[in-house]
Image (cartoon, helix red, strand yellow):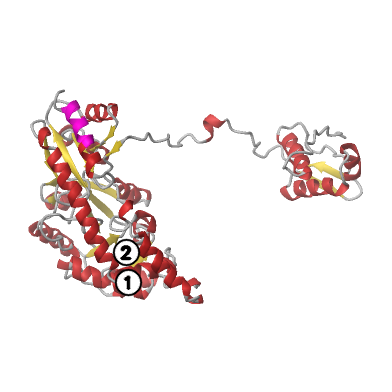
């Protein structure tokens, strides 16, 4: 019988019984205590350690419940037979998280294309609406809501979409969810797995990775200045096309009406073909009116429309919506409506009143003016660089692209910018095909302007000018 020489620390915040439990467990895991070996009785160990018997009993009870020791009536406690079980070994800190992300470096100037100006968020309005909704003490607010999202919110979004985006839908067709990722996963349960999905290249890699992880067969289709090439799509064997026709990410291409009609014709030629339209930032257009959604031209129920408030309000509210064409709506009701809503009813009601009371429209007008000012500042500051690069993707969204022809590679451009404290982003990060052979992309960087004010934009471009123009 092992006397178990345990050094208890009475000043430790860890309870004494837990210290005894940990000591015995570790000895068993390290095979210092062999299987079948008898342990001291609770009376003997409490006397040996000068602690109460109940303290030892608590430690033994925990070891018993976890299967490290066994109790035999009238004989005592014995180490359980765990020789063939996986031996738990403390992993070294270096190997604990091999894929842990490195701390991202902070830069004085960051042209992130995914930025949102959170300083313009309507905090006072949001706070007021939150207070008004929670003041009434409605118990209904905290019951499980409609799996598609609250009817009032869906009705408000439908009215907004019809007026602003030309979308034709009924509230019954809409599903509200916590972000586009969730909605695409939900869509997977509706569509089933036997599909080949085509995305533009370069493309939004989050969607590409998501479809791959959902075990879909995924391919990419080339683009020209009008968007996805429909002839290439036809030969790809895909039956679902994922597109961003109003402002393609990352290239910023706006798909003209003729190409949209060709895409709808492709979808209508074969039963079971669909188009997923991701309309992520169409509110921000600085020349002319916002481009109407592709869904508004669809008369055959072929477009699955997805939108979000992440760009127009804030990413953290996690509010997106999907509009299903009638044929898929029937499948959703049959197969997937049992899945509960992933968005809080309180948040849904706040957003509903934010839209209905006109706050959303005022916020959009304010934000659009703010981004336009930054866009115009950036365009003006880029004039000295026009001899070494060309600009595309302007007049919409919150980023534009610089295509370089000064002999520098994309990597060199990024490193030179980094050296002067400016973070820029390469187009190759969005190239699914890997830029080999004929698909090799021209050295191109993305400059997002939502995160920086006009002064910082001007300062950052002056730094880049010294690095790029004089190189």
The numbered dot on residue 139 is none
Q: Is residue 442 visible?
A: yes
Mark 1 or 2, nearer chain start: 1
* 240 versus 387 height, above or below: below
Give the camera-side residue of 32 and 351: 351
Residue 252 % position (x, y): 17, 48
Q: Quadrant of residue 257?
A: bottom left
Which quarter of the rendered picture does the N terminus lie within? top right
Residue 415 % position (x, y): 27, 27
Which quarter of the rendered picture does the C terminus lie within? top left
Q: Residue at x 27, y 38 (%)?
A: 429
Give the camera-side residue of 388 and 188: 388
* 27 versus 210 height, above or below: above
Q: Main secondary structure of the magenta part?
A: helix
Label 2 SS: strand
Relative side of 165 to 54, left or right: left
Residue 465: in magenta span: yes
Residue 118: in magenta span: no
Residue 203 % position (x, y): 24, 46
For label 2, the residue is 321
Q: What are the residue bounds of the magenta stretch?
A: 459-468
Relative side of 196 to 151, left or right: left
Q: Residues within 10 Å of mark 1 (few under 14, many from 20)?
A: many
Q: Residue at x 78, y 44 (%)?
A: 17
CA–CA distance in space, label 1 to label 2: 9 Å
Label 1 SS: helix
Give the camera-side residue of 324 and 416: 416
Q: Quadrant of residue 145?
A: bottom left
Q: Quadrant of residue 172?
A: bottom left
Residue 126 % position (x, y): 37, 64
For label 1, the residue is 154
CB under 8 Å between callouts 1 and 2?
A: yes
């Amino acid at each position: 019988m092992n006397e178990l020489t345990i050094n208890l620390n009475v000043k430790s915040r860890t309870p004494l019984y837990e210290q005894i439990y940990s000591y015995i467990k570790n000895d068993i895991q390290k095979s210092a205590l062999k299987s079948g070996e008898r342990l001291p009785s609770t009376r003997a160990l409490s006397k040996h350690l000068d602690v109460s018997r109940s303290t030892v009993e608590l430690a033994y009870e925990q070891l018993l419940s976890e299967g490290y020791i066994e109790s035999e009536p009238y004989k005592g406690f014995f180490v359980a037979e765990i020789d063939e079980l996986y031996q738990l070994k403390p992993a070294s800190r270096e190997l604990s998280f091999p894929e842990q992300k490195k701390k991202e470096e902070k830069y004085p100037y960051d042209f992130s294309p995914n930025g949102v100006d959170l300083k313009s968020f309507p905090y006072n309005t949001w706070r007021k609406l939150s207070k008004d909704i929670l003041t009434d003490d409605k118990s209904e607010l905290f019951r499980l809501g409609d799996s598609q999202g609250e009817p009032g919110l869906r009705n408000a979004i439908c009215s907004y979409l019809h007026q602003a985006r030309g979308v034709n839908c009924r509230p019954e067709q809409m599903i509200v969810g916590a972000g586009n990722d969730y909605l695409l996963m939900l869509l997977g349960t509706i569509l089933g797995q036997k599909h080949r999905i085509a995305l533009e290249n370069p493309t939004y890699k989050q969607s590409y990775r998501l479809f791959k992880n959902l075990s879909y067969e995924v391919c990419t289709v080339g683009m020209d200045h009008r968007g996805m090439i429909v002839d290439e799509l036809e030969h790809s064997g895909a039956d679902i096309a994922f597109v961003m026709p109003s402002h393609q990410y990352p290239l910023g291409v706006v798909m003209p009406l003729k190409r949209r009609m060709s895409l709808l014709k492709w979808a209508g030629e074969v039963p079971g073909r669909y188009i997923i339209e991701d309309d992520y930032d169409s509110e921000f257009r600085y020349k002319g009116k916002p481009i109407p959604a592709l869904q508004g031209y669809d008369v055959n129920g072929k477009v699955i429309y997805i939108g979000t408030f992440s760009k127009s309000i804030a990413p953290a509210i996690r509010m997106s919506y999907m509009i299903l064409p009638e044929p898929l709506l029937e499948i959703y009701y049959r197969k997937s409506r049992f899945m509960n809503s992933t968005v809080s009813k309180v948040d849904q009601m706040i957003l509903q009143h934010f839209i209905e009371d006109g706050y959303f429209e005022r916020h959009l007008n304010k934000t659009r003016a703010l981004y336009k000012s930054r866009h115009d500042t950036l365009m003006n500051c880029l004039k000295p660089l026009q001899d070494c690069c060309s600009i595309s993707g302007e007049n919409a969204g919150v980023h534009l692209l610089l295509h370089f022809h000064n002999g520098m590679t994309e990597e060199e451009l990024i490193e030179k910018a980094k050296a002067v404290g400016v973070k820029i982003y390469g187009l190759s990060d969005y190239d699914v095909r890997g830029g080999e052979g004929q698909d090799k992309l021209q050295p191109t960087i993305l400059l997002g302007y939502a995160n920086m004010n006009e002064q910082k934009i001007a300062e950052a471009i002056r730094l880049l000018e010294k690095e790029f123009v004089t190189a």
